Image: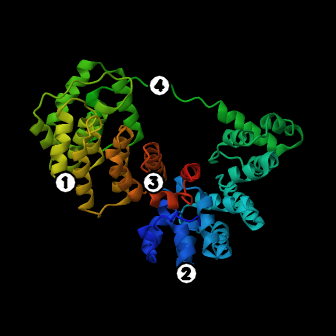
């Protein structure tokens, strides 16, 4: 080490061996500290967690985590063969906790590092899945083997085409071409004359592209939509119809909805009216509510949690001085939720940061879903700020986010404002999100 240059202090989380639960939580979130823990302490204690993460996708947000992160941890543990073999066995047995797509991603990461047994396991997984009308493994085969992989996938799928097949045939071809195989579709069509299975694949592809949906329906009236919601209907169909109504409505109709929303007492009615008020990018902005701020607060604290949540969602979309004032009343009562935070998007002050952190630290009994909603609200706040007084919110979000994409947002904001801490820089090189690793390398 150069004379006069001292090493930065080690992070607090490296001072002691993590418990199994601490390690599992950090691995589920893709934090780089897991790599350091495995290198510092006896890693054998955590092999079972690595196998869980490899084979069952137990994390809240493993879709955002690069599977190579799991392979890095397995190699750092000193037991990579055991972890890899567990993933291969899970793929072969189909006992995956319902996440064969995750296992496919992990096996792909092993195969990219030259492990032939992982590549063979992907082939077997695809063979078993395609026979059931599924396509897990197809993209991995194509990315590993290019056009030759596409030919194998097309032949196997072509021999199993049925009405129940849940494949994205065009996406397989696009994946091949994006991997550098120019003209993959035309090359495949050139084989069809002498290959019945490829011909069947291409016939299904053409049919997939020619499917026409039903003509758009006329918007249903608000009374009919309310009747469906009060009757208990939810889901995509009703949401689509509400969106269609909102886009066809004028400002006067929206104002009538806002007045109705303030007095409704049925959870289903509140749900639908809230969606009508906030949906549709092209709908006219509705007028501010005429009710007093205390009346708005009362709606946000309604005895029915569904009406309370719908009220916060609607009011968070408004602007004007009453919105942040309402947020501060709710925060003072300990209601730190995404929509409450959204109400401060235009007027966050340093004293608000202190209150938010105080309320966040007062309770750690939250589910991953609840924490994620709060994190989304915090990310929305800090991304609108150009001043460093919001950095404590970004640091809380980084540490607690169950979502890799949100953590990436916090790291990028901290980097832009020169607020990356030594602790984050220390572990970011081994983060499960590739863009965070790249950012850490650029700052080194």
Q: Which residue is drawn at 52% across and 68% down?
A: 34
Along the viewing direction, whichever of 422 and 203 lies nearer the viewer:
422
Q: Nearer the viewer, residue 435 or 302?
A: 435
Q: How crowded is mark 3: few (under 14 residues within 10 Å), some or many (20 or more)?
A: many
Coloring basis for residues = rainbow
The CA span between labels 2 and 1 is: 42 Å
User: Which residue is at 68% across, 58% downward?
Assistant: 108
Rounded to the nearest angstrom, the CA distance separating label 3 from label 2 is 28 Å
Q: How far apart are marks 2 and 4 (CA)?
A: 61 Å
Q: Is residue 103 above or below residue 303?
A: below
Residue at label 4?
216
Spot the residue most to the front.
3
Sequence-wise first label, 1 or 4: 4
Determine the image quadrant of residue 209.
top right
Q: Which of marks 1 and 4 is in front?
A: 1
What residue did someone put label 2 on? 42
In the picture of the structure, the residue carrying the numbered disc 3 is: 403
Report which quarter residue 115 is drawn in: bottom right
Is residue 391 toward the left or the right of residue 54 in the image? left
Q: Of marks 3 and 2, which one's residue comes earlier in the chain?
A: 2
Horizontal and vertical percent position of residue 104: 64, 59
């Amino acid at each position: 080490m150069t004379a006069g240059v001292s090493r930065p202090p080690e992070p607090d989380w490296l001072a002691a061996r993590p418990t199994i639960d601490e390690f599992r939580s950090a691995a589920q979130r893709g934090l780089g500290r897991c790599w350091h823990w495995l290198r510092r302490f006896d890693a054998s204690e955590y092999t079972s967690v690595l196998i869980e993460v490899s084979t069952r996708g137990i994390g809240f947000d493993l879709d955002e985590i690069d599977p190579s992160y799991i392979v890095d941890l397995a190699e750092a543990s000193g037991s990579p063969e055991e972890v890899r073999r567990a993933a291969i066995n899970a793929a072969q047995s189909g006992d995956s906790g319902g996440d064969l797509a995750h296992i496919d991603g992990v096996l792909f990461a092993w195969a990219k590092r030259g492990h032939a047994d992982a590549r063979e396991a992907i082939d077997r997984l695809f063979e078993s899945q395609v026979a059931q009308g599924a396509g897990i493994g197809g993209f991995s085969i194509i990315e590993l083997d290019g056009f030759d992989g596409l030919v194998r996938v097309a032949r196997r799928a072509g021999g199993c085409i049925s009405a129940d097949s849940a494949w994205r045939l065009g996406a397989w071809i696009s994946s091949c071409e994006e991997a550098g195989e120019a003209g993959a579709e035309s090359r495949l069509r050139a084989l069809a004359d002498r290959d019945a299975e490829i011909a069947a694949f291409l016939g299904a592809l053409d049919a997939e592209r020619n499917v026409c949906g039903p003509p758009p329906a006329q918007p249903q009236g608000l009374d009919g939509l309310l009747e469906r919601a009060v009757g208990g209907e939810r889901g995509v169909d009703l949401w689509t119809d509400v969106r269609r109504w909102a886009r066809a409505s004028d400002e006067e109709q929206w104002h009538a909805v806002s007045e109705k929303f303030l007095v409704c007492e049925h959870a289903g009615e509140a749900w639908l009216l809230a969606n009508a008020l906030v949906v549709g990018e092209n709908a006219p902005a509705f007028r501010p509510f005429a009710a007093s701020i205390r009346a708005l607060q009362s709606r946000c604290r309604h005895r029915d949690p569904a009406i309370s949540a719908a009220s916060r969602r609607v009011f968070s979309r408004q602007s004007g001085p009453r919105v942040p004032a309402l947020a501060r009343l709710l925060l003072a009562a300990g209601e730190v939720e995404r929509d409450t935070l959204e109400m401060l998007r235009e007027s966050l002050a340093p004293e608000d940061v202190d209150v938010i952190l105080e309320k966040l630290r007062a309770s750690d009994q939250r589910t991953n879903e609840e924490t994620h909603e709060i994190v989304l609200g915090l990310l929305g706040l800090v991304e609108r700020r150009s001043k460093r007084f919001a950095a404590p919110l970004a640091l809380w979000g980084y540490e607690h986010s169950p979502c890799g994409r949100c953590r990436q947002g916090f790291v990028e904001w901290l980097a832009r404002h020169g607020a990356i801490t030594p602790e984050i820089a220390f572990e970011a090189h081994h983060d499960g999100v590739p863009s965070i690793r790249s950012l850490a390398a650029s700052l080194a």
